[in-house]
Amino acid sequence: MNQTIIDVFGWIGTISYLTAYYLISTKKIEGDSVPYQLMNLFGGVLLTMNAVFHGAMPAVGVNVAWIGISIFALGRARLSRK
């Protein structure tokens, strides 16, 4: 993939993380809400792609963990709705 596209993905992922953090910090959404977790999942995927491309393995690690936490929370939310 083109470096410019990867960098745009990284910036979109960053915006997604920061928007989620802003919304939870201002109590506009709850930490266990689906929108919050989806923003974190989306941001994590894009930032992982960016970090892999740039060989930033510590950033890959933290973003993969972030993705895992988001998937776990989304699964838990889905189970609690049943």
Image (tube, rainbow, N blue to C red):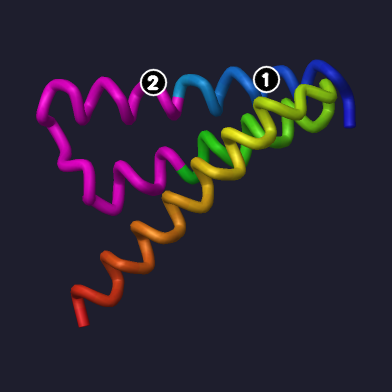
Q: Amino acid at mark 2?
A: Leu
- Kindly identify which residue carries mark 2: 18
Q: Is residue 20 above or below residue 77?
A: above
Decide: few, some or many residues near mark 1? Use Cα within 10 Å; few <14, some 14-19, many ≥20: some
Q: Position of residue 4 (x, y in %)?
A: 80, 16
Residue 64 horizontal side relative to residue 7, left or right: left
* Residue depicted at 51% across the width and 21% down the height: 14
| Principal secondary structure, stretch drawn in magenta | helix
* Residue depicted at 59% across the width and 18% down the height: 11
Q: Residue furthest left?
A: 27
Q: Nearer the viewer, mark 2 or mark 1?
A: 2
- Kindly identify which residue carries mark 1: 8
Is 17 in the magenta?
Answer: yes
Element type at mark 1? helix
* Residue depicted at 69% across the width and 33% down the height: 60
Q: Position of residue 6 (x, y in %)?
A: 76, 25
- From which residue to which does the magenta span run? 16-40
Q: Position of residue 28 (x, y in %)?
A: 13, 31
Decide: few, some or many residues near mark 2? Use Cα within 10 Å; few <14, some 14-19, many ≥20: some
